[in-house]
Amino acid sequence: MKRAATGSLIGLALGDALGFPAEFDDVPSILAKFGPWRETELPSPAMVTDDTQMTLALGRALTRAAERSLCGPERFAHMARTEFVAWNESPDNNRAPGATCIRACELLADEERPWRDASQLHSKGCGANMRVAPLGLMPWLGDDMRAGAAQLQSALTHGHPTALAASDLTAYAVRLLAAGTEPLGLVGRLRSYALENRTHYREHWLGDLWTRSQDPGPEHFIARGWDECLAVLERLAAAVKDANPETDPCLATGAGWIAEEALATGLLCFLLFPDEPLTAIRRAACSSGDSDSIACLAGAFAGAHLGAGAWPKEWAERIEYRDELLALGQAWDA
C-alpha cells in the first residue's frame, strides 16, 4: 500500500520543520545560513509551526466527528471550533501564529457567538489552507462533504472568498494525488474544478456568511475567490512550463502569505520535482516568502503522491508530533 495519508501528514510536518528556520528571510540570507539549498538538513530538534499544529487540530476534529459518522455542518463546525480554541489557548502555541487565527479563535472562544460572526472576512491568509490536507486524505469523504468542510474550516478563521476557494482547491489537490492522479495533469484538473464551482456558494455549509461582506449576492461573493484562484493557476501553469529550479519559486507564483499564492507556490515546488520529495521541500524552504507554509504544502502534495515511503526513516522518526501524525495517517490509510 502507498499509505498516502501517512505520507502526506509526515511530508507536511517535515516541510514545515525545514521551512521554519528560514521564514522571514530572503534567499541570499537562507543560503548564507544553511548552505546550498539542495543539501539542507532537517533541523535538530525538528520543531514544527502552527501549520502542523492546526493540521492536527483539524485532524482531531474530523476524528471526533467520524466517531458517529461525519455529521452535518453545524456539528463539524462545533468540533473544529473546539479544537481551534484549544490550540489557541495551548502553551505550545508559541510558533509565531498568524494574527488572523489568533483573533478569530479569541472570538470563537465565546460559545454564545455564532461562528460566522467570528470569521475574519477581510483575511485570505495562508492559515486557511495550510491546515486543510486532512480533508483530502479521508478516502470515504464524498466530494460535496470534502469541499463543504474544507470551505467551512477556512471560514472559522479566514472568511475571505479566496481563502475558501483556495482551501477547497488544496484539499482537492491532495485527494487527487492520493488517488493516483498524475502530476502532469494536476493543474488542468484544478482549473476545471475552479471553473465548475465558480458561482457555487455552498449555503448548506456556510449559511449566510456572505451577508457579512459587501457583495450583492452569494454567487458574486464566492466568484471573487474562485477568480483569484484561477488567475494564480494561470501563473502556475506558465511557471511549470518554463520553470528554472534554481530560481526562487516565489518570483513566479507569489510569496505565499496569502492563500492562493501558498497553494500555487507549494504546488510549483512539488511539480518541479514530483519524484524527488526531499528536493521539493528543500526548494520550498529556500524561498523568499512564507517558507514554512510553502514547504508544508509541498510536503503534503509530495507525500500524497508518493506515500509514506517518500521520506527517509531518519527524518520521519525525528519530527515533532510524530506519534499523533502516524496515528492519524494509519487510521485514514486503513
Image (tube, rainbow, N blue to C red):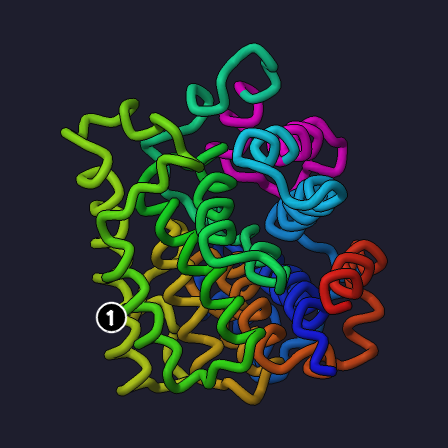
What span is in magenta? 80-107
Amino acid found under the numbered disc labelled 1: Arg
Q: Is residue 222 left or right of residue 244?
A: left
| 90 vs 67: above or below | above
Q: Residue at x 48, y 33 (%)?
A: 157
Residue 282 visible? The answer is no
Residue 191: x, y in percent? 28, 68
Q: Which residue lies furthest to the top in this view?
A: 112
Asked whether, in this view, residue 80 is left or right of residue 193, the answer is: right
Between 326 and 67, the residue placed more toward the observer is 67
Q: Magenta region's main secondary structure?
A: helix
Residue found at x 37% / y 79%: 247
Q: Name the residue that disc number 1 marks.
A: 235
Q: Percent x, y for residue 170? A: 45, 60
Q: Is residue 327 magenta?
A: no
Give the crowd class for mark 1: few <14, some 14-19, many >=20 residues within 10 Å. Answer: some
**Residue 313 to residue 220: above or below:** below
The answer to whether residue 97 is magenta is yes
Between 64 and 70, the residue placed more toward the observer is: 70
Q: For the N terminus, which image quadrant?
A: bottom right
Q: What's the residue at 36%, 35% (across, down)?
A: 203
Residue shown at 44%/62% (left/top)? 26
From this view, report whether residue 48 is shown above or below residue 125.
Answer: below
User: Which picture quadrant has residue 325?
Assistant: bottom right
* Residue 272 makes an appearance in the image: yes
Q: Relative to 311, is 12 on the left or the right?
A: left
Seen in the picture, residue 181 relative to 25 is either above or below; the reply is: below
Q: How far from the left and from the top, in percent, is residue 121?
A: 34, 31
Element class at badge 1: helix
Picture quarter with the C terminus: bottom right
